[in-house]
Amino acid sequence: MRRHPVATKRTLRAILKAADICAGQPAVAARRLVDGGFTPRYDHAMQTLEDNGYDRWREYNPEDTLRFYALRMRDAGMIKATPQAIIAAGANWHFLDEVKRELKA
């Protein structure tokens, strides 16, 4: 992120735009999944897109999400650090906040 801020921002923007397309145009997204060879069945792709909350990324607090998954990983013995330590050492919401503002429209 520090070495490639422009690439980081572009990647994050692409991921969030893709989530918006999956939420707002699931039929288009399902067709692209099938046409791209990611899945052979349109009906399965469509069901998956309809069942998942791709539009919820705007509602969730990213720090709470990171804390939740860090706790699960710590409970499973996958990491030793506390969620607070992980957030303090590596969480920078600058790009996310910036892209969220851009994508508000």
Image (tube, rainbow, N blue to C red):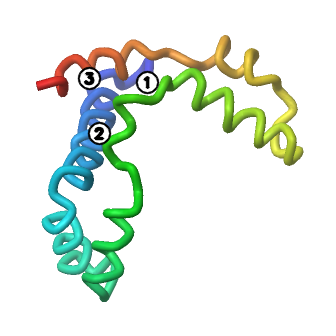
Give the mark toward the camera: 1 or 3.
Answer: 3
Q: Is residue 61 above or below residue 71?
A: above
The amino acid pointed to by label 2 is Leu
Image disc number at residue 90: none
Comes first in the chain, label 2 or label 3? 2
Which residue is situated farthest in the bottom direction here? 40
Side of 17 relative to 81 (left or right): left
* Residue 65 horizontal/vertical position (percent): 58, 31
Image disc number at residue 99: 3
Image disc number at residue 1: 1
Instruction: Tell me the residue that label 2 is attached to.
Output: 16
Tell whether label 3 touches label 2 (CB within 8 Å).
Answer: yes
* Residue 38 horizontal/vertical position (percent): 33, 76
- Number of residues whose C-alpha sits closer than 10 Å to that of mark 1, classed few (under 14), some (14–19) or many (20 or more): few
Q: Secondary structure at mark 3?
A: helix
- Locate residue 1: give its quadrant: top left
Side of 57 relative to 37 (left or right): right
